[in-house]
């Protein structure tokens, strides 16, 4: 029998990426060959996203693309958009956020003829698809890259007024520390030097078990003891959770990367209140002050939503001014997207697209300006980079504080010394808008 093939596509966050890799690993272990998503495959798996209207639209687009690429293939649509919509007309198998572990078994059943159905006629049970316990989908021990992502938490309890994710992912569930540590040990044995801890609400790790934010510091301390792990990077964190004691405890863990990605969302207190966020700009500024006082050469990056319902010109300017004052290394700008089922969807004064686009442009321009200045300040320094690619006469990677770096080789001897996944000391020669230009 010919070797079966599978193609995978992930939309959305790092948690989705981890879960796709976990599903892919089951197909590979069963003898499937993984091809590019745009190639003709026997099975296609699309891990969908619903965080914005654009993400939901693209999810449907990729499902339809898979069907066109091979009308006879088994098309599996899974994840957050499927959880919210309940079905997909173009998919043979639909799985919500709680049943991704069944993807391989259901594909095999479908192929064997034991589970044939007309595409799109089945709907998932939305209530049943949000489990109360953490759904163990790992371990994932190989990645297409030099950094390994480790999911340690799922779900969210906060219900921000703009966000549909708690309805798609359910309540907070923490992964067992034993499972996390075993996976990291396996990753270290496979040569990974850096692990990135991820979750839907990473700050809530342990809260469902009656523990506080120090649970995250504790698991990071245990990971730091594993031979071979040189860097521990934390995913997106919520400002409300970042107590001074927690930050200080992280700072004495030498393997914690001095880079924090914080979910700011707005620099206007009145907008933050309408968003149902649990802090104001004063609280956020105190968190940043604690981080910068405890970590040397630390970088702060943030998420921002522009064009929230009712956002005035003054509130937008407050976000601009606060961002400039905080001097973030980078900002991820998202245009507000109306999601039915959220409180914000029913708010008055939904912004016109041209207003949202202009505010997004201004924030992106500010982000570019601040990033360029941050990079320029590092010229002449001697950081280390994790080499992630080796292509022609250059290697690219990231510093511990998450600055992109590019090293060009002067001769073949230098190139021969480089192995993707290893960490190397470099000298920063210059910088541009996006990267440090370094010499090994």
Image (tube, rainbow, N blue to C red):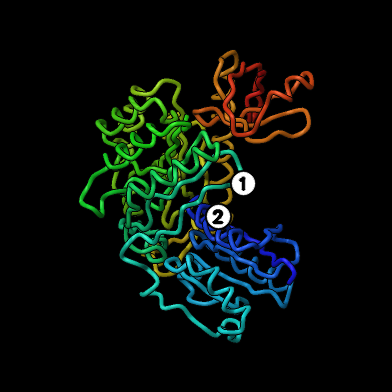
Q: Is the C-beta separation of discs 2 and 1 under 8 Å?
A: yes
The image shows residue 367 at horizontal and vertical percentages of 54, 35
Q: Is residue 94 left or right of residue 260?
A: right
Q: Residue furthest front?
A: 1
Query: Which is nearer the eye, 104 or 292?
Result: 104
Instruction: State the separation of the CA atoms marked 2 and 1.
Output: 9 Å
Residue bearing mark 1: 144
Give neighbour class at mark 1: few <14, some 14-19, many 20+ (Cα, 10 Å).
Answer: few
Task: Tell me the number on the disc at residue 410.
Answer: none
The quadrant of the picture occupied by the C terminus is top right
Q: Residue furthest top?
A: 380
Vertical side of 338 occupied by 226: above or below = above
Is residue 380 among the parts visible in the rendering? yes
**Element class at badge 2:** helix
Residue at (34, 23) in percent of width and height? 294
Residue bearing mark 2: 21
The image shows residue 75 at horizontal and vertical percentages of 63, 72
Residue at (75, 69) in percent of width and height? 2
Is residue 324 among the parts visible in the rendering? no
Residue at (23, 53) in percent of width and height? 209
Query: Tag 1 or tag 2, which sits nearer the N-term?
Result: 2
Q: Is residue 104 left or right of residue 43?
A: left
**Element class at badge 1:** loop
The quadrant of the picture occupied by the N terminus is bottom right
């Amino acid at each position: 029998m010919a070797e079966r093939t599978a193609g995978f596509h992930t939309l959305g966050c790092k948690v989705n990426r981890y879960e796709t890799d976990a599903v892919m690993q089951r197909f590979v272990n069963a003898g499937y060959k993984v091809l590019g998503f745009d190639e003709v495959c026997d099975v296609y798996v699309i891990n969908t996203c619903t965080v914005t209207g654009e993400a939901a639209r693209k999810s449907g687009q990729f499902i339809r693309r898979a069907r066109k690429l091979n009308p006879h293939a088994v098309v599996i649509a899974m994840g957050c958009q499927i959880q919210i919509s309940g079905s997909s007309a173009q998919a043979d198998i639909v799985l919500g956020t709680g049943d991704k572990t069944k993807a391989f078994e259901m594909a095999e059943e479908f192929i064997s003829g034991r589970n044939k159905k007309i595409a799109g006629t089945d709907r998932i049970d939305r209530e049943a698809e949000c489990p109360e316990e953490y759904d163990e989908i790992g371990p994932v021990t190989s990645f297409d890259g030099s950094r390994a992502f480790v999911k340690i938490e799922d779900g969210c309890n906060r219900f921000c007024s703009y966000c549909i994710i708690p309805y798609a992912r359910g309540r907070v569930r923490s992964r067992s520390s034993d499972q996390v540590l075993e996976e990291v040990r396996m990753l270290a044995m496979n040569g990974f030097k850096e692990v990135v801890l991820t979750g839907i609400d990473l700050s809530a790790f342990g809260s469902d078990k009656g523990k506080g934010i120090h649970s995250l510091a504790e698991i990071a301390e245990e990971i730091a003891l594993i031979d071979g792990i040189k860097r521990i990077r934390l995913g997106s964190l919520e400002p409300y959770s970042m107590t001074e004691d927690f930050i200080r405890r992280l700072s004495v863990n030498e393997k914690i990367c001095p880079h924090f990605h914080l979910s700011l969302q707005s620099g206007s207190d009145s907008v933050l209140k309408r968003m149902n966020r649990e802090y104001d700009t004063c609280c956020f500024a105190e968190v940043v002050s604690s981080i910068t006082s405890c970590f040397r050469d630390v970088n702060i990056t943030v998420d921002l939503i522009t064009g929230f319902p009712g956002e005035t010109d003054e509130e937008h300017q407050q976000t601009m001014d606060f961002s400039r004052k905080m001097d973030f290394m980078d900002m991820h700008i998202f245009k507000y997207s109306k999601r039915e089922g959220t409180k914000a969807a029913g708010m008055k004064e939904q912004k016109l697209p041209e207003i949202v686009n202009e505010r997004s442009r201004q924030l992106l321009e500010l982000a570019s300006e601040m990033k360029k200045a941050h990079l320029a300040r590092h010229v002449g320094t001697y950081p280390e980079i994790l080499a992630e690619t080796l292509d022609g006469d250059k290697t690219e990677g990231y510093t511990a504080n998450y600055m992109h770096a590019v090293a060009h080789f002067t001769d073949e001897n230098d190139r021969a010394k480089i192995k993707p996944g290893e960490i190397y000391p470099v000298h920063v020669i210059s910088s541009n808008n996006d990267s440090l230009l370094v010499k090994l």
